[in-house]
Image (cartoon, coloured by chain):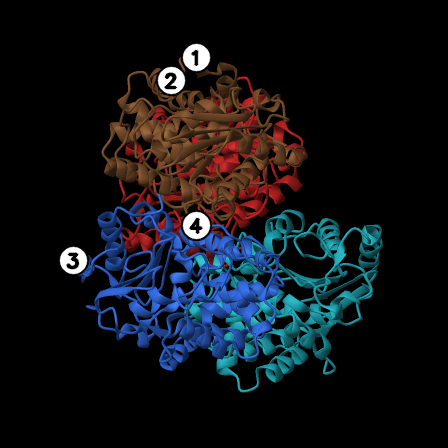
Chain colours: A red, B cyan, C brown, D blue
Amino acid sequence: MPELALLQQVVERVRPLLGQGKVADYIPALASVDAGKLGIAITTVEGVTLGAGDYLEPFSIQSISKVFSLTLALTLYEESEIWARVGKEPSGHSFNSLVQVELESGIPRNPFINAGALVIADLLQARLGAPKHRMLEVVRKLCGNERISYDRLVADSEYQFSARNAAIAYLMKSFGNFHGDVNTVLQSYFHYCSLQMSCADLSRAMIYLANRGVSLTGERLITQVQTRQMNALLATSGLYDGAGEFAYRVGMPGKSGVGGGIIAVIPGDMAICVWSPELDKQGNSLAGTAMLEHLSQELGRCIF
Amino acid sequence: MPELALLQQVVERVRPLLGQGKVADYIPALASVDAGKLGIAITTVEGVTLGAGDYLEPFSIQSISKVFSLTLALTLYEESEIWARVGKEPSGHSFNSLVQVELESGIPRNPFINAGALVIADLLQARLGAPKHRMLEVVRKLCGNERISYDRLVADSEYQFSARNAAIAYLMKSFGNFHGDVNTVLQSYFHYCSLQMSCADLSRAMIYLANRGVSLTGERLITQVQTRQMNALLATSGLYDGAGEFAYRVGMPGKSGVGGGIIAVIPGDMAICVWSPELDKQGNSLAGTAMLEHLSQELGRCIF
Amino acid sequence: MPELALLQQVVERVRPLLGQGKVADYIPALASVDAGKLGIAITTVEGVTLGAGDYLEPFSIQSISKVFSLTLALTLYEESEIWARVGKEPSGHSFNSLVQVELESGIPRNPFINAGALVIADLLQARLGAPKHRMLEVVRKLCGNERISYDRLVADSEYQFSARNAAIAYLMKSFGNFHGDVNTVLQSYFHYCSLQMSCADLSRAMIYLANRGVSLTGERLITQVQTRQMNALLATSGLYDGAGEFAYRVGMPGKSGVGGGIIAVIPGDMAICVWSPELDKQGNSLAGTAMLEHLSQELGRCIF
Amino acid sequence: MPELALLQQVVERVRPLLGQGKVADYIPALASVDAGKLGIAITTVEGVTLGAGDYLEPFSIQSISKVFSLTLALTLYEESEIWARVGKEPSGHSFNSLVQVELESGIPRNPFINAGALVIADLLQARLGAPKHRMLEVVRKLCGNERISYDRLVADSEYQFSARNAAIAYLMKSFGNFHGDVNTVLQSYFHYCSLQMSCADLSRAMIYLANRGVSLTGERLITQVQTRQMNALLATSGLYDGAGEFAYRVGMPGKSGVGGGIIAVIPGDMAICVWSPELDKQGNSLAGTAMLEHLSQELGRCIF
């Protein structure tokens, strides 16, 4: 088990990188975050959580929520129902591109780009009476923190600037691959993205990915095989158009969000969450990636 | 260590799939292969090789050679020299597409699609007096088999139908990312692809990927970090536009060739090679993928 | 002036082509039209209208309305305001593609593809209190037929299947090139498309394009230079991805609609409208194009 | 007939535009041209040639030669043989793009982009013993100037930087739409482009396009219908990705070259050639387009 000192050292080592990235500013609510935040937390399969820096401070998890959405969908649908509507391949395009969706007849490449996550949100909407409420319930239970909540300011702000995501949803609808009301599903989708969680929360919530599908409280969320598959999808498609570089440098399945968070998994061992709001050109946390890279090197642990 | 019986069982289990794929027929020399061939071999880091089916029969390794090319390039160049000319991301397009190369100013997405491998071949040509000879030497030594050779019929046949690859090379040249004579480099490239090796040969040759960069004879080819990085690239980009599905089903870094071979790696443990000439829609061996999937399940071993 | 006999002969000559095309069926209201309809009408700059076949029967003018929209916009805006938001080039893509709009930052290629016409509809919405009412007024006056009206069944049906156009509008909104409420503008847009007019009506309404901008009643709609420019845009972009073939065969500026109508212009001479509901692969009236081709040959008149 | 004074006035009116464009510099031989050159010449169907400015000075006609190539091909092949291998539609992409060629299975969009002109050059190569010699013969006769010749410096220079065109040719070859030896055809192609002609020469040579297919010497090159069709193709595809804007501003069929020349046609009336080496963003002569625009306005003549 890594010692606390290692985590502290990792945080300090990347601090000089602050200033080299760019905080997401497409909505005011995200642009106002303190760019100097740096945090890391790990949770081991034994249930121990350690952290350094701003690891207890909640931030906007944004696209990291796509992992929770897919997990929830896996509990509600047959796998074939899901994979008939979304692919499993890296996209080769930016996260919010419509080109691929048009060229490939409305089927998004994977569940971790916006188009794919919107299909998943559409699936959740169709089976759940109150999807926003249910998601909150699931996430709170996963990390054992009842205070986790949506940031309505962020959700509303996203909704106000939602034209691109609306375009994607309508395009899929025109191909018959989006069934619900676009506005309703977008509302849910933006709420999922607006979840406020700390590195500690996220590393605890994600432990099922390191623990064969079993959560901290010992509950099975998804099967062992599904966990393996989820990690495989995260490894190939979890970091937008930077998945190859991330695998190359960090070597772990992971998922990033434009809020500056990244979760990563060492199967059988631990779940990790880093946070630093400044993003690189691919939209992934710049210092966050560096923290994971250092951790991987120091632990001598990665999946490759 | 898996027993021989397991490998035999894996071969028999996929035999019913024969007939569902399609042998590559873009050159006569490949089209004439016996579609009913099925082989699997593993080599452990301890140096033990086991096999079943047609695992001793040489076949055309085709794009699997791209792993050897990149490895050789890593021994001749600084990493920065290589990655300035080729990317590390999945392509999201078919293996021989020019669209991405044009849109991204002549920089191929990764070294395992044709465009990227041609850049690597161009790099080898620039540093090696006799690259075809040298490649043969390296590969023979890696698997300890002096009889390994090029299939000149295949190489010539490829060269005769080389218009698409010539187009890719000239397109990169127009962007300043291809320096050598196109015909000369294509000749070398097609020779690498025409290597005739058996599953046993390939699983032995690739063991360095499972063994931190050290070959069967105890020689270090590349560093431990480079080995990890190579596996990361294979996991995200090794199976053309089917890398996500392969990770999902098999969960190992791998590389396929249109000759029907696939190599895969369980880091720290073993290198595997399967062979079955019929391909699926993405151009990867159909029964070969299934063999790896069964093996992964039976061993309970994958990287995720 | 062409004699009536010529028009009748043109109609009979193309009758054998019936059955070779395909009636638009993306909405039920259009799919139910009688595929055997065939009509042609011409109106000369002197104000004489002649017709043959079903030239008095109203049909759904669909995209032909894009000519009226642009004309109306030219009366409400400075030209620079219009051309800052929509281009003048042929698109090289199908009429409802989003690819080009995404790649070119939300600026549609021309006002006659869906994206461009939606921008024009957005412009009309911003300046007109009651754009649907105003459009009806303009068109009725242009052809001197007070009975012209919208087909609300068609408009509603289009709106019900409007996902693709909504996607285009939202995509442009995400680039800041669509200002109004998407649903409101779509409602107006689909109403314009649902105008019911006969060949006679349309040839009369369009005479200003042959008459330097002056309508049948002697009113100036647009300047002589604007008329010339409108004809130029129709010649290069009026027939979707079939403009080159249409210029090659017919040699006149023109605009087609999926209802099977095509209007064409011989500047200084006459406006023509043909109608036959079956479409070719580019979505243009198959027999309609043939009628125009024969007429052009018989008259020995085209712009080239 | 326009008076000489008008042409002189047109030249002076655009002189202030010098300095706003950019001389083609992709080969040294073109980059060294005097950017201050300005010329215009017209030839009427009666055979009178008038000019102003540097209208007697030969320049590199470059892509204007694509008009001669297609004309020559029309005399050697059935039309169906030509149009089976090249389309008639505007491309919607830049003149040397491979994207469209790949997406549309090796069939270029029209004969005036590079890919299309290479197919035409391939056709000429297949039917003519000495295509370069024959082209020279044809062009010399068309304008009655025996001193017209290739600029071998330019041709060689083009060939040296021919990677992009080689890529296009090989790509088409891979689709079976290029039959000859790539290098040989490229050599011919670059020679055609290197023709040195003055505005006077070009306006005389192109008169058949204004004169129903009949040259200055009274010889019929192509039929009246083919002439009309050629003008139609020039109007929709003659100015690369600026055909719409050119039709809008100038309103004549035309063809431009990166040497700064543009030819234009008023059917039944005259052929025009302008020259000014500085190009706009689409690669068309900036001041040349302006000269044609002024001439069109002053004459009150265009095809629309």
Which residue position holds label 4? Answer: D92
Do badges 1 and 2 share one subunit? yes
Image vertical order of residue C101 relative to residue B265, above or below: above
Where's residue B303, x and y in %? 61, 53
Which residue is farthest top?
C147
Discs 1/4, front:
1
Which residue position holds label 2? Answer: C144
Where's residue C176, x and y in %? 31, 35
Where's residue A187, x and y in %? 43, 24
In the rendered structure, the answer to whether residue A295 lies left or right of residue C70 reads: right
Discs 4/3, front:
3
Residue B210 can be seen, yes or no: yes
SS category of the residue bearing label 4: loop
SS category of the residue bearing label 2: loop
- Alpha-carbon neighbours of circle 4 within 10 Å: few (<14), some, or many (≥20)? many
Q: What is the distance, in whole Å, between disc 2 and disc 4 at their CAs?
A: 39 Å
Image vertical order of residue D224 relative to residue C117, above or below: below
Return the disc, 4 or 3, that comes first in the chain's sequence: 3
SS category of the residue bearing label 3: helix
Instruction: Kindly identify the residue that appears in the image at 52 percent across and 80 percent down.
Output: B125
User: What amino acid type is highlighted by mark number 4?
Assistant: Gly
Instruction: Kindly identify the residue that appears in the image at 77 percent across and 60 percent down.
Output: B276
Q: Nearer the viewer, residue B8 or B116?
A: B116
Q: What is the distance, in whole Å, between disc 1 and disc 2 at their CAs?
A: 9 Å
Which residue position holds label 3? Answer: D9
Which residue position holds label 1? Answer: C147
Where's residue A291, x and y in %? 39, 52
